[in-house]
Amino acid sequence: MRARVLIRPKAGILDPQGVAVERALPALGFSGVANVHVGRLVELDVEDPGQLEAMCEKLLANPLIEDYEIVHPGGKPPGDPPLRSRPAAT
Amino acid sequence: MRFGVVRFPGSCDEVDALQACERVGQAEILWHGDRDLRGVDAVVIPGGFSYGDYLRVGAIARFSPVMESVVAFAHEGGPVLGICNGFQVLCEAGLLPGALLPNVGLRFLCRQLDVEVVDAGTAFTGAFAPGDVLSIPAKHQAGRYYAPGEPRVVFRYAHDANPNGSSNDIAGVANEAGNVVGLMPHPEHAVDALTGSTDGLKLFESAVALASA
């Protein structure tokens, strides 16, 4: 099964790449852009999508500094954990 | 006193680390694919770009066979020093708290810095006094330290000259026990007057003094 994992900087942690892109867009004439964040996308074929959560926690993301979101192209299988978005620990 | 310096694919500072260790004791290279630490008394995880820094800095190196042994060695109280990429690897491995994020300026930083010793009670800072200032180089793109809670701070960037946006000017931390230390600047590049400073040597001397105490 094909799956995608979207990984982004955790809210509350400075994302200098996002800031740089946000500043660059108006310079090119694009106005009204805010809250830009740059993350990464991991695409993978998995036999057992139930393992994706553990893969994210152990390797694909660093939960201390990143949020991740598992996307199944065919819809979320039953029992799939909800979208991860935890506030940064302080 | 025998040091082991780990070599990952993509390490680039392991020879300087080896030579720094050899100034104060014996040293050998430990291959990343080998679980055997060959009975060394201390381990250095050097700088570089282990496994190409793919995914995240230090993320893949953490699962290297040698790291299983390094983790066990550290849990038994063995002294482990992580420099730059080594610091990033130790954070990913859970031996040190926190994580290293891209520099605020997004640029690769390469300059001689003043670093203040905050904690002289760790395995690698016993030869210092708190407040001592070292002139050592830093060269990295992901040196912005972040950790929830209050890590054991060992080094800070001096004179409020924080080069990378690191939280609380933190340049290096230790685990609670003080046997595992990581820092972004490079003491192993500051061990010979020829390159401008010998201030980094004391980290290695500290480990020797502790072993012979």
Image (cartoon, rainbow, N blue to C red):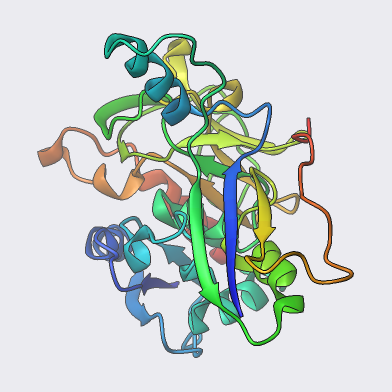
Residue at the extreme right: A79
Instruction: Report the residue at 71% width, 73% height from top.
Output: B76
Instruction: Report the residue at 16% width, 33% height from top.
Output: B196
Q: Position of residue B183 (x, y in %)?
A: 48, 43
Which of the 4 image quadrants contains residue B211?
bottom right
Q: Position of residue A89 (x, y in %)?
A: 78, 35
Q: Is residue B77 visible?
A: no
Please tell me which residue lies in front, B193 or B105. B105
Please tell me which residue lies in front, B107 or A45. A45
Q: Is residue B84 visible?
A: yes
Which of the 4 image quadrants contains residue B57?
bottom left
Residue at the extreme front: A74
Instruction: Report the residue at 55% width, 65% height from top.
Output: B212
Q: Position of residue B26 (x, y in %)?
A: 34, 73
Is residue A46 rendered to the left or right of residue B138? Answer: right
Q: Is residue B151 above or below residue B55?
A: above
Residue at the extreme left: B194
Instruction: Report the residue at 56% width, 58% height from top.
Output: B90
Q: Quadrant of the C terminus of chain A?
A: top right
Q: Quadrant of the N terminus of chain A?
A: bottom right
Q: Is residue B85 above or below residue B165?
A: below
